[in-house]
Amino acid sequence: MSGVWIFKNGVVRLVENPGECNVRKMLVHVPSNDVVTSYAILERKLSSLGWERYYDDPSLLQYHKRSTVHLISLPIDFNKFKSIHMYDIVVKNRNEFEVRDMC
């Protein structure tokens, strides 16, 4: 293992290729290999899988699937859409979405 160990906010992690690229997490719709770059794209993908939008809380985007107890809650601003939200979507839609590292 080569790279640089970085200590930040009490956490130590290994950065294998420092300076090469800034790795960002991206949500990818697996069947189409489309990167989700907006909520409009995400909403189309989710609605095709049976998810319905809830309008109860104006500060969140929420989706519910009638056949399950699952609820997806997202920040209203796409710039605040983080990996934790992506993984929530992946877990609730197995084999449909993946989180990938992008430079």
Image (spheres, rainbow, N blue to C red):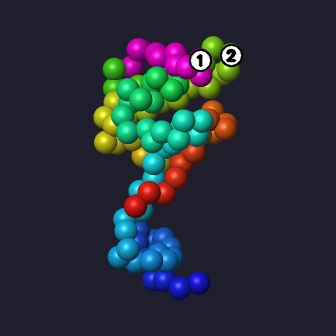
> Three-letter amino acid code at disc 2?
Ser
* For the residues bearing labels 1 and 2, Cβ distance under 8 angstroms: yes
Q: Could you tell me residue 9's position as x and y percent?
A: 41, 68
Q: Quadrant of the C terminus?
A: bottom left
Q: How many marks?
A: 2
Residue 60 place in picture, x, y as percent: 38, 27
Residue 17 in the image: above or below residue 73: below
Look at the picture and state if 54 lies above or below 20: above
* Percent position of residue 95, x then y: 67, 38
Q: Nearer the viewer, residue 52 or 40?
A: 40
Task: Work out whether mark 1 precedes mark 2 in sequence or the reverse, and give the earlier one.
Answer: 1
Residue 75 falls in which quadrant of the image? top left
Q: Is residue 50 above or below residue 22?
A: above
| Distance of label 1 from label 2 (alpha carbons) | 9 Å
Q: Is residue 44 visible?
A: yes
Residue depicted at 54% across the width and 36% down the height:
32
Circle 2 — which element?
A: loop
Tell me the residue that label 1 is attached to: 50
The residue stretch that appears in magenta: 47-57
Q: 77 or 22, which lies in front?
A: 22
Q: Is residue 80 left or right of residue 1?
A: left
Task: Name the residue at 35% across, 76% down.
Answer: 19
Vertical placement of 61 versus 66: above or below? below
66 part of magenta stretch: no
In the rendered image, residue 54 lying in the magenta stretch gets the answer: yes
Residue type for callout 1: Gly
Crowd around label 1: few <14 · some 14–19 · many ≥20 (10 Å): few
The label number, if any, that marks residue 91 in the structure image: none
Quadrant of the drawing holding the N terminus: bottom right
Q: In which quarter of the view is residue 35 placed?
A: top left
Residue 67 numbered tag: 2
Q: Nearer the viewer, mark 1 or mark 2?
A: 1
